Image (tube, rainbow, N blue to C red):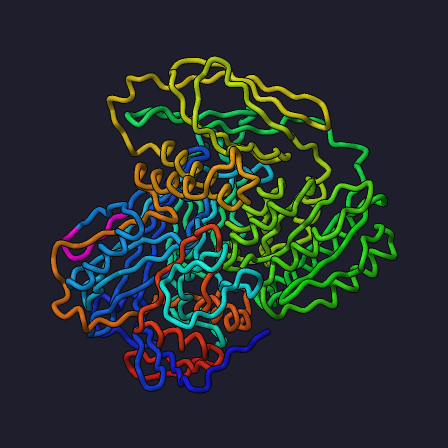
Amino acid sequence: MLKVINHTACLVLLLLACSVAEAADMGGTIEALADGKRINFPLLKTEMLAKVKGDLVTVTVKQTFTNPTDKPLHATYLFPLNQDAAVHKMVMEVGDERVEAKIQRIEEAKATFEHAKQQGKAAALLTEHRPNMFTQDIANLMPKLPVQVTLTYSQTLPKVDGHYELVLPLVVGPRYQTAGAGIPPTPTAKVDSKTTYGQWEVEDLPAYPVVAGAGLNSPEIIDKDRVAIRVELDGGLPISELSSKTHVIAEENISENQRVVQLAKGKTIDNKDFVLRYRLSGNNTQAGLLAHQDERGGFFSVQLEPPAVPAVKDIAAREMVFVLDTSGSMDGEPIAASKQFMTHALHNLHPNDYFRIIHFSNNAEEFTAQPVAATPENIKQGLFYVDALTADGGTEIPTAIEQAFGKPAQQGTLRMVVFLTDGYIGNEAEVLTQIAEKISDARIYALGVGTSVNRFLLEEIAIKGRGFARFIDPTEKADDVAIKLASKLESPVLTDITVDWGDLQVSDISPSKIPDLFAGGAVRIQGKYQQSGQHTIKVSGLVNGRKAELPITVNLPANADINSSKHDDPIPVIWARSQIADAMRQINTPSYMRPEGIAENDLKDKVTKLGLDFSLTTQWTAFVAVSQKIVNQHPEQAEHSNVPLPMVKGVTEEAYGESQQLAATQPMMTAQHFSGGATPEPSTIAGLMVMAAIGAWTVYRRKKHGMGYVGR
C-alpha cells in the first residue's frame, strides 16, 4: 500500500478548551498546525429523529455548527445519508433568523451561495455528490453565533430476510480513486472542474476532510457525543423482534404497535452506521399499497412479497465466483470477517458445484487458472489460499470485474458471483457501466463488509447483477451471513415479473425493469395513476419455471383529496426519487443497452426537472439558504475549514493514507456525470496537508487547567 508521508508538513492536532460559552458544550476546540500556520476546525453536533409508520420513514437531521475561535470561518462538512433518501426540505437558523432553503440548479445554487459569502451573509449549501454522499457548506460561521441546519428526507424501508430495516449512515469512509482506464492526460494549462477528454467527463470528488484518530491510538479524539438518535416507530401492527446489532439501544414500549427507541447512552460518536430491524406481526399479506393524490396528480407504491413455495430439491450446477477485496481499507476486522465468511461459504458448496476465488487490490489475482470442482481437497486448498491473504494497496474493482467475467462460465453451470468489499471507491459509475456490459446471464450478490460501507454502490451492483446485497458487520458472526446466503441461493426466486394494470391508467412506472424477488425480501413498484376508486391488477412471474399470479385489489384516493393540497405526505417525493434512481441507472448503462436508446442529456434533463418540481436534491439540483442580515463585516478575513470526521470503526489507519490522498487530489472520471464538489479553495490546501501527513500526527488535549498528553 502507498504510504503517504509528507515531511514538509509539521502537524500538531490540539484539543483546547472552548473560548466561548456556546462552544463549551461542543467538546472543545480542534485545530492543527501546518508549517507554522494554525488551522481551525468548526465543531458539530447532530440530532436525528426518525418517524416510522409501517414501512415509511421521515427523518429530520439537525446539524448545529459552532465556531469556537475568535475569527470567522467558512465550514464544509462531508456526511452520508441513506442512498434511498428523498431530501425534500432544508431550513437554516442563525440568530433570530429562520430561512427555508430554496431548491435551485446546481450552478445557480453555488452562485447564490458564493455571492452571499462575499456579502458577509450566513449561508448554507447542500450538495449531493452521490445518492449517499453529501456536503453541507456554511458561509460566515461567526464566533458566538451557531448555525443550525435541519434537513428532512423520506424513504421506504426495505424488507431484508423478513425484517424491516432502518439504516442511518453516520460517517463517510475513505474513497480510493482508481488509476484505471479513463484517466485523461495531464493538462498543460489550468482547466475547469468539468473538462472532457474523449468519452470521460472529469469532475472532482469532494476533498476528504481531516480524520481525527488516523495514526492515533484514540479514534474518539474529536468528540464522543456528536450524534443523538431517536426513532418513533408506529408499525400499524404489533411490533416484534426489535433490535440493533450496531448500537446499544433503550426501548420504550408505548403500545404493542408503537415503540420509541433511543441510544442507551443518549449520544454516540459518528464512526459507524446505525441499523434498526423489526418485524410486523400478523402481516401475512403478499402485497401492500400506499397512495396519495394532490394537485400534482395521483401517486402509488405497491410492495410485493414472494409466494411461499417449497425450496428446490435439485439444485443446478453452479460456478460460484468469490471476489474478495484485499485493499488497505479492508485491513483488520473486515478482512478477518471475509475469511470467516469464506470458511462457511466454501463448506456450503454442493458436490456438483465449481468454484473460483479472486482477490483484488491494485490488481486482481486468482486461486486457480480454471474453475475447480467443489471436492473436499479443492475446498481445503481454497481455504489455505484465503487464509494467506493480506489487505494492502488500492481498490481497483474494474480489474476484479474483468477477471470474474473475462472468461466463459464452466460449461453446464450457472455463474453466481459473490463480491465481498467495503465499496470505498470514487469511480462507482465506471464499475456499474462495466457490470452492465459484462454480466451476461450471471448473477451478482454484493456483500458489504464493514461498519460504514458504501451501501449505494453495493445495492446498485446487486440491482445490475439481478441479485441482492447484504452487509456484514465485522463485530457479527460472518458465518451466520454465509449460512443465510447459502439458504437464500437455494430458495425459489420469482423471475420475469410483469404487471397487468387492467383498466387502471398508469404512467411513469419505476423501476423500468422489475427485479427478481428473493425469499424474505420485497419489491416495490411505484408510479402515477389517473383514476381513483377500486381497481384490480394482476402480478405475474415464474417460480422454478412455473407460472405464478397474484391478483391485487387497490383502492386509490379520490379527487376530493386534491383540495387539501398537502405536500407533507412522503409518497410523491418517494416516487420522484425512484424516478431519479431509475434514470441514473439508465445513465450508468451503455447507450446501446438503454430502452429506446434514450439520450443521456434527456435523462439528465429529466432528473433536473424532477429535482426542481419536487424540491429534491439530485446530481444537478441543490438546496441553498441565505440570511437577510450581514453577520460578517469583513468576509475577506474568513478562513475555510472542514469539519473533521472520526475514523470508521474497524478501518485501520493505513486506509487513511492512500485513499484520502487519491480522493482529495485526483479528479473523478465518469461518463455518467456523477457530480463532485467544487475544486478546493486555496485556503483548503492547508487542510489537505493535514491529510498528507496524517500518519505523523501528535495529539494533545488542553483542558482549562493545563495540557495532558493523549497519545500518538
- Residue 138 inside the magenta-drawn segment: no
Q: Is residue 327 left or right of residue 86?
A: right
Residue at image point 49% right, 35% down = 239
Asked whether 222 or 72 is in front, the reply is 72
Residue 296: x and y in percent read 31, 27
Residue 28: x and y in percent read 31, 72
Which residues are drawn in magenta?
90-97
Q: Is residue 55 above or below residue 134?
A: above
Asked whether 44 or 235 is in front, the reply is 44
Image quadrant where one finds the N terminus: bottom right
Residue 229: x and y in percent read 39, 51
Q: Is residue 439 above or below residue 532?
A: below
Residue at image point 22% right, 46% down = 100
Residue 346: x and y in percent read 77, 52
Q: Is residue 164 above or below residue 337?
A: above
Q: Is residue 639 left or right of residue 365?
A: left
Q: Is residue 646 left or right of residue 484?
A: left
In the picture, residue 541 is in which quadrant?
A: top right
Query: Mainly helix, strand or loop, the magenta region?
Result: strand
